[in-house]
Image: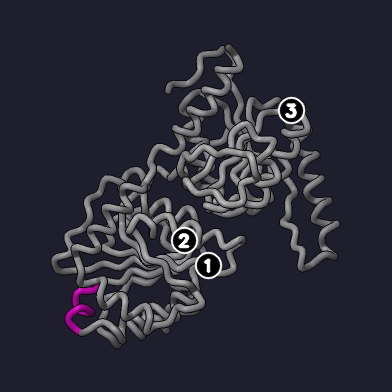
Amino acid sequence: MEGIGIMAKPLMIIAAGGTGGHMFPASAFATEMKSRGWDVGLISDVRGLSYADQFPADWKLEVEAASPNLRRPWTLLSILLKLWAGQAMALRRFKQQRPTFVAGFGGYPAYPALGAAKRLGIPIIVHEQNAVLGRVNRVFSRAASIVASGFSRLDLLPAGLSHLTVGNPVRPSVVEVAGTAYPDPGEMLRVFITGGSQGARILGDVIPEAISIHLDASLRSRLNVVQQVRPEQIEQVAAVYERAGIRADLRPFFDDMPEQIARSHLVIARSGAGTVSEIAAIGRPSLLIPLKIAMNNHQTANAEGLRDLGAAEIFAEDGLTADVLGTRLSRLLPDSTKLQDMAAAAGKAGRLNAASVLADAVENMLNAVAD
C-alpha cells in the first residue's frame, strides 16, 4: 500500500525501550513509515538512544525513564518521579506538535510517550516482540487501537482483547540474506553461536567442552565454529578449541549477525524475540537456550514457536551440561537431512513483511476515520 494522500504529513511517534531488542524492530517500522511519506519522531531514554544512531527519525527526544523493581521498594518513589518527569516532557512536545499515532515497542522508556498520548486522546499502537506481553505494553493494551504481536502466540494479553499478528520487523540486512540457500553440508560444517548483545557466560563454559569432548575426530575436522564469547572468556575458549583441533572464530560481538546466520548450518543461541525472528526469516536450524531469568519466561515462549514447527530444539539453562548438549550435537551435525528439514521449517515461519503489514493496519485505520 502506498502512502496516504493528504496535504499535511502525518506524524508517527515511536517510543521504545533501551535495548536493541526493542529499538531494531522500531527502526525497521520507522523506515517503512518514512517510505510512505510520514514524519517520524523517536522518544526513548539515554540508553535507548545509544542504539539509535541509524534510526530514521526526523527528530529524537530523550526522556527520563526507569524500570520499577519490586524487590527494591525504597526505589519506587524515585522511579515514579522519573516516569512522571518523562511524561511531562512528552506532553509538552505533543502539545507543540500533535502526533497522528504513538507506537510503543515495549520497555519502560516507552511509558512516558504512551502515557502522554493516552492523556491527550492520541491513538496508541503497541507492538510486542515477544510471545508474552510485556509490562508496559500490558498497561496500555486496553487503550491501544492496535495490539500487534511478533508471534501468533501472545500470553498475558488481558481478557477480551485481540491482537494482530504481524511478525517482528527485521533489519534490511536480514531481508538481504533471507533468500540465501541453505549451505551445502557436504564437507565443512559451520556452527554459529551467539548469546545476545552482551554474550552469555554459560555458553562460553558449556559449548566448547560439549563440542571438543563429544564429537569424534572426523566430525571435529569438518567443523568451523563461529562463536560470540565474552572478552574475559576468549583466551580460555580458544584454548579448548585449539586442543581439539577445531577451527574457531571467536569475538565479543558480531555486527554482521544476519550474514553469520545465513552462512551457518546450525545456530546455537538465546531465544530473544529478535534472534528467533531473524533465524526464522533467514531459515536456519537452531538449538535455543532460553535465558532462565527472562521476565515471565518469555524466551521459552519465543522458542516454543519454532520448536513446535520442527525448526528448533530447546535446552533449558538449568539442565544444560556439556554431556547433554554434546550428545545431541554428535547425532544432529552428521544428519544433513534433519538439518535441512529444520531449515525448511524455520523458513516457513519467517516473516519479512512485518513492518509493511503493521503500516498497512495503521493507514487503513486512519483512512477509515477520514472516511
Image location of residue 25, percent across then percent down = 50, 45
Residue type at tag 1 = Leu
Residue 50 spot, x, y in % from top left: 59, 52
Mark 1 packing: few (<14 Cα in 10 Å), some, or many (20+)? many
**Which secondary structure lies at badge 3?**
loop
Give the residue pinned by disc 2.
271
The residue tagged with tag 2: helix, strand or loop?
loop
Q: Is residue 341 above or below residue 41?
A: below
Above or below, 218 against 292 in this view is: below
Q: Which residue appears farthest toward the left when viewing the image?
A: 186
Quadrant of the rendering where the N terminus is positioned: top left
Q: Residues within 10 Å of mark 2 (few under 14, many from 20)?
A: many
List x then y, in percent, for residue 227.
37, 70
Residue picked out by circle 3:
121
Residue name at image x 49 percent, y 71 percent: 200
Q: Is residue 50 visible?
A: no
Evaluate if marks 2 and 1 touch, with contact meaning CB atoms under 8 Å apart. Answer: yes
Examine the rendering and report whether any part of residue 347 can be seen: yes
Pointer 3 and pointer 1: residues touching (CB < 8 Å)? Answer: no
The mark found on residue 291 in the picture is 1
Say which amino acid is labelled 3: Gly
Q: CA distance from mark 3 to mark 2?
A: 36 Å
User: Does 180 sit left or right of 149 as displayed?
Assistant: left
Q: Which is nearer the N-term, disc 3 or disc 2?
A: 3
Residue 91, picture quadrant: top right
Q: Nearer the viewer, residue 206 or 88?
A: 206
Q: Earlier in the sequence, mark 3 or mark 1?
A: 3
Please give the range of residues in magenta.
Answer: 217-223
Q: Residue at x 54, y 46 (%)?
A: 53
Give the residue displayed 77% in from the left and 63% down from the top: 70
